Each structure stands twice: as C-alpha cells, then as structure tokens.
Image (cartoon, grey):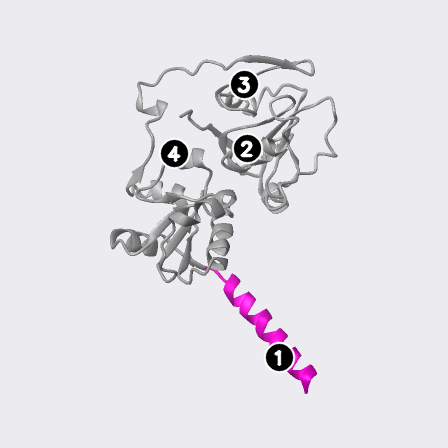
C-alpha cells in the first residue's frame, strides 16, 4: 500500500512539474490587444543593449541573467498578466524568462514569440534611447586598429566587440584568412543556413560554456548569432581571451542556406 502511495505521489509531482513548464504562446493580434487594453506587463528578455536600441513601448527590461536582481520590479500580484518577448521567433530568451516567472509563482505568463522585430515591422509603438541613427547619416569610420596573430582587425566600441561596420563589409566576401567565424546557434539553426566558412559551436547559456576545441590556436575567433546578443554573452564569458583573440560581431544575421544578409547594429 505504501509503495502504491509513493508511486502516486511521484506521478503527481511529475505531472505538476510538467504542467508548470508549459508555456502559453500568443501571436501578434493577442499581444496587440493586451497592449492596447493595458491588460499586461510586457517584459523584454533581451540584453540591456538591445533594449536601449528599441523595445515595445512601456516594457521593462528583464534579462534572464539579471532575473533575481530585478524580481523586485515585478508585480506583487502573482496572478497579473505578464508577456515575455525577445528578438523574434528563433530567440529562446523569452521562453527562459517565462519559465523563471513560473517558478517564481506567476500564474498568468504569456510568451509573444514574434517579439520586438515583428512589433516594429507592424509599426506598433516603440521606445528607445537616442541613437546615432537619429542624427544625419554619415559614413561610419573604422574603430581602433588592432593587430593579433598576424592579422589586422578593427575594434568596436565595447569590450570584445569587433568593429561591426567594418566587419559587415568584409565578412561575406573578404574575410581575413586568420579569422575563424563561429556560429554559436544550435545545430539545427546552423544547418538551416549560415555564413560561408563558419563552423558551429553552440553556446550553452545555462552553464555559460562553449566548446572551442575544434578551432586552431593560430586563429582569431569571432562569434556571431542572429542578433549579436548571445554572441556577446559567449565572448564575454571567456574573460581571459575576450578582446585579445576572441571577439563578437554585433549585427543582425539572417541566412537562407549560404545566402546571408548582414546588417550591423548601431552604436548607442
């Protein structure tokens, strides 16, 4: 009898955990309705840098790695509707944030997978810090010149960043031979399309690890992803190498097979 009771209790726990992990995903029409009726708090799961460049009007920035420090800004009412969003359909940070919200006791968690890119595309209300794009358009000058491992590169404005405007012009056609591009997305995303010459080394964001064993020591390493967000995380995790021989590319990269479009992100 006791054994049966324990089995039932174990089954109940497993079912309860599984149910708590289920996420309710909403599409643009529902997100728009919640926004216009002021029925939910929108939470931007992206890094602060992307949040500052542009986000859904009135949203709060709550990156996964700052969740515990920022939980005090969340509603006291655990039944309040909250909408987690990120950088589009392939961005998983909104899911990660939603799971953390559920674990914290929030019962009305929604995930808007279209996120900021779709919201912007639909010409919905946005907010952002003033960026260089608000000024008259000028040709971007290259960043500081830096020589490493027999190759000259140009540095971006932040630690570990390769100059995104220079790199945008060379990455598809004239990539220096001593640079190894590393696509840090999941294997399935890499197989769907990636920049020619890149290798795949998926970034393990939970454990903050990346396997670079397949890369020669005489190469400069440049990480990229879809938006620059996770590549920055991966590069900065390698504290002893970032900015020395490990860099990240701060850009939006979209690929269909090996046909890729690259657009450098603006400086703040």
Q: Position of residue 261 (x, y in %)?
A: 49, 32
Nearest to N terminus: mark 2 or mark 3: 3
- Over which residues does the magenta segment extend? 1-23
Magenta segment main secondary structure: helix
Q: Quadrant of the N terminus?
A: bottom right
Q: Nearer the viewer, residue 61 or 84?
A: 61
Q: Which residue is mark 1?
A: 8
In which quadrant of the rendered view does residue 88 lie?
Answer: top left
Q: Residue at x 31, y 37 (%)?
A: 127
Q: Which residue is mark 3?
A: 155
Q: Residues within 10 Å of mark 1 (few under 14, many from 20)?
A: few
| CA distance for labels 1 and 3 | 59 Å
Q: Is residue 145 above or below residue 69?
A: above
| CA distance for labels 2 and 3 | 14 Å
Q: Is residue 254 visible?
A: no
Q: Quadrant of the C terminus?
A: top left
> Element at badge 4?
helix
In which quadrant of the rendered view does residue 82 lie?
Answer: bottom left
Nearest to N terminus: mark 3 or mark 4: 4
């Amino acid at each position: 009898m006791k054994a049966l009771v324990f089995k039932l209790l174990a089954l109940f726990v497993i079912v309860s955990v599984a149910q708590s992990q289920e996420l309710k995903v909403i599409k643009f029409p529902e997100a728009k309705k919640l926004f216009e009726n002021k029925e939910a708090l929108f939470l931007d799961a992206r890094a602060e840098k992307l949040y500052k460049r542009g986000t859904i009007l009135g949203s709060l920035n709550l990156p996964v790695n700052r969740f515990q420090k920022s939980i005090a800004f969340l509603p006291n009412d655990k039944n309040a509707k909250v909408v987690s969003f990120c950088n589009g359909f392939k961005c998983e940070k909104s899911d990660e944030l939603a799971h953390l919200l559920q674990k914290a006791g929030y019962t009305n968690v929604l995930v808007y997978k279209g996120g900021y890119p779709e919201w912007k595309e639909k010409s919905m209300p946005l907010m952002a810090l003033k960026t260089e794009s608000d000024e008259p358009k000028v040709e971007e000058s290259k960043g500081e010149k830096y020589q490493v491992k027999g190759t000259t590169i140009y540095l971006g404005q932040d630690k570990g960043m390769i100059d995104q405007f220079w790199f945008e012009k060379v990455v598809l056609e004239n990539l220096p031979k001593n640079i190894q591009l590393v696509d840090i997305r999941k294997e399935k995303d890499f197989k769907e399309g990636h920049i020619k010459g890149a290798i795949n080394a998926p970034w393990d964001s939970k454990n903050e690890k990346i396997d670079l064993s397949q890369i020669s020591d005489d190469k400069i390493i440049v990480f990229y992803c879809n938006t620059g967000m996770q590549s920055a995380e991966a590069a900065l995790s390698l504290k002893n190498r970032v900015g020395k021989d490990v860099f990240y590319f701060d850009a939006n990269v979209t690929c269909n097979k090996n046909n890729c479009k690259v657009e450098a992100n603006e400086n703040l």
